Amino acid sequence: QVQLVESGGDSVRAGGSLRLSCAASTHTSNRCMGWFRQAPGKEREGVASIDSADSTRYADSVKGRFTISKDNAENTLYLQMNGLKPEDTAMYFCAAAPGCGSNWYQSARYSYWGQGTQVTVSS
């Protein structure tokens, strides 16, 4: 069982930055860790993932702006978000899966989820 708790969401203006954190209750270094987001009326979408070898993948919409990282010693996952746009507004979730793979963006792969943290970007 893995418990995940996100933090760091806030309201910012377009062009601003935020860093989201996801604290895990146990070691997750051997898991695929992902960030997802869901805007009102939209499906949950994969934002980024990082695997046990620290290989990262990103949705096209955030490439070059967002960076996923992790601190295995602290069991914490991060998402650095720069150049935020109003379309980034959503509830952001972290999640854990046994492995990443080419379909890392599919939420069904992930067994454990946090409760989410809200990011709101105004123009």
Image: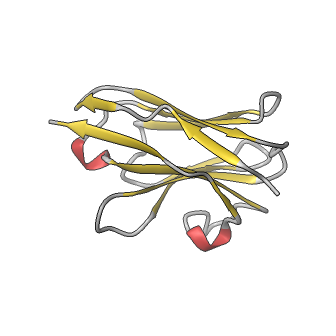
The foreground one among 63 and 72 is: 72
Which quadrant of the rendered structure holds the N terminus?
A: bottom right
Image quarter for residue 66? top left
Where does the image place residue 7, in percent across and percent down from the top left? Answer: 53, 35
Image quarter for residue 109? bottom right
Where does the image place residue 17, in percent across and percent down from the top left? Answer: 37, 26
The foreground one among 15 and 39 is: 39
Where does the image place residue 62, in percent across and percent down from the top left? Answer: 40, 46
14 in relation to 118, above or below: above
Where does the image place residue 65, in percent across and percent down from the top left? Answer: 40, 36
Residue at 80% across, 33% down: 72
User: How many marks do you count on the picture?
Assistant: 0
Residue at 19% across, 36% down: 122
Residue at 42% across, 28% down: 18
The foreground one among 113 and 59 is: 113
Give the left or right position of residue 99, taking residue 85 as reference.
right
114 in relation to 72, above or below: below
